[in-house]
Image (cartoon, grey):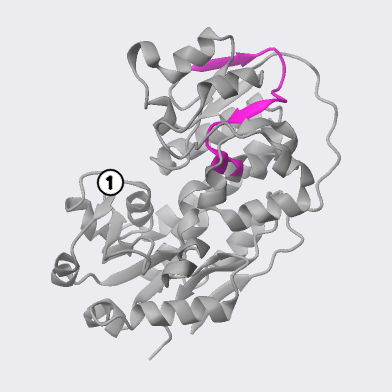
Amino acid sequence: MTIARRSLLLAGFAWPVLAAVAAEPVTATDVLGRTVTLPAPAKRIVLAQGRQLNALGLIHPDPISLLAGWGNDLERQNADGLARYRARFPATDAVPIVGDGGTANGFSLERAIALGPDLVVLSRSLAGTRRGPGDLVERLEAAGIPVAVVDFFLDPLRDTVPSLRALGRLIGRSDQAERLITFYEERMARVAQRIAGAPRPSVFIHAHAGGYDCCMTAGQGTFNAFINAAGGHNIAAAMVPGATGQIGLEQLIGADPDIYVATGGTHLAKTGGLVLGLGVGEADAAASFGKLLATPALATLSAIEKRRAFGFWHLFNDTPLHVVAIELLAKWFHPERFADIDPAATLAEGARFSAIPLDGTLWIAAPKA
């Protein structure tokens, strides 16, 4: 069993002491092209989606100290990451909840306003859920609260860099954000250069693999962008019109992709799915992956018969460190072109930016025949 597991327990623990930030106005452009100006770097932020802490924690050594409130979706989306924040930053549990930021109607505008934040950060999906007179951006601004829209999910290859740059400027951490952007862009450029002119294998991404009826997948959404960037062809792109959706098992078997990639997380442990993620041991990951590949219907796929079956952490889908997932995919799709590329080294370098350790089994490959 080829399993990649890297313990980065010291990641993020060697931050320099922050210099005092002058109380001067800061200006940034968000992903909607809006100009956002604050009288000073934000110190009381409401994250409408709690999972955007994934990005904030890459550009600030103590992101919890900046929070006036947040959505409770991180508990559901990334419980292991949240546990690491709780362990390192005891104030995590004292941050007020402003509803469920993972749903269109879950965010409480009233709670957010009552907290008196100096900035509210919305994702594209939340910024677009209320239109006309009820527009969430307009209502917050009408209450005198600045709003920045950043996103790492819907179109990550377009939005990651401007989102990081905007967040960096708005919290007075531009230097750190620019270092992260340089790291990100250099590795993305390396992948693009190496896949140029290569034939594109057909790929199926099995999202939340083993935890639900077969088969959840990506249509035009995040993982489709990952596949394209890594030099593959997503077979579900023509079958699923939205960002995500479900195809029938018969469709999958009929398409018989060259490569099968499952996504997993600790949220699938209770349902018998693929278990990968922060804090996951190699044995647990291997057992869950073996069980998945032995599923009678899936076992008939050529990709699984030929050991061209892989898995990675589902939550690479909402962090700037998705560059690691794209390197993994590129190496799996084009092993001859990426023989000297080590995604674990890329993860280790990316983890140096992180406020929490990024240890665990985050990807896996079928054993060689």
Residue 36 within the magenta-colored segment of the rendering: yes
Asked which quadrant contains residue 235, the reply is bottom left
The three-letter code of the residue at mark 1 reads Gln
Query: Relative to residue 158, is residue 91 drawn left or right?
Result: right
Query: Relative to residue 347, is residue 312 drawn left or right?
Result: left
Q: Quadrant location of the C terminus?
A: bottom left
Q: Residue furthest bottom?
A: 369
Q: Is residue 227 positioned above or below 176 on the image?
A: below
Q: Secondary structure at mark 1?
A: loop
| Residue that numbered label 1 is attached to | 220
The location of residue 339, given as percent across then percent down, is 48, 73
Query: Relative to residue 250, is residue 30 drawn left or right?
Result: right
The location of residue 33, given as percent across then percent down, is 45, 20
Return the residue nearer the eye: 281 or 115. Answer: 115
Return the residue nearer the eye: 286 or 136. Answer: 136
The location of residue 182, given as percent across then percent down, is 59, 43
Query: Relative to residue 90, is residue 234 drawn left or right?
Result: left
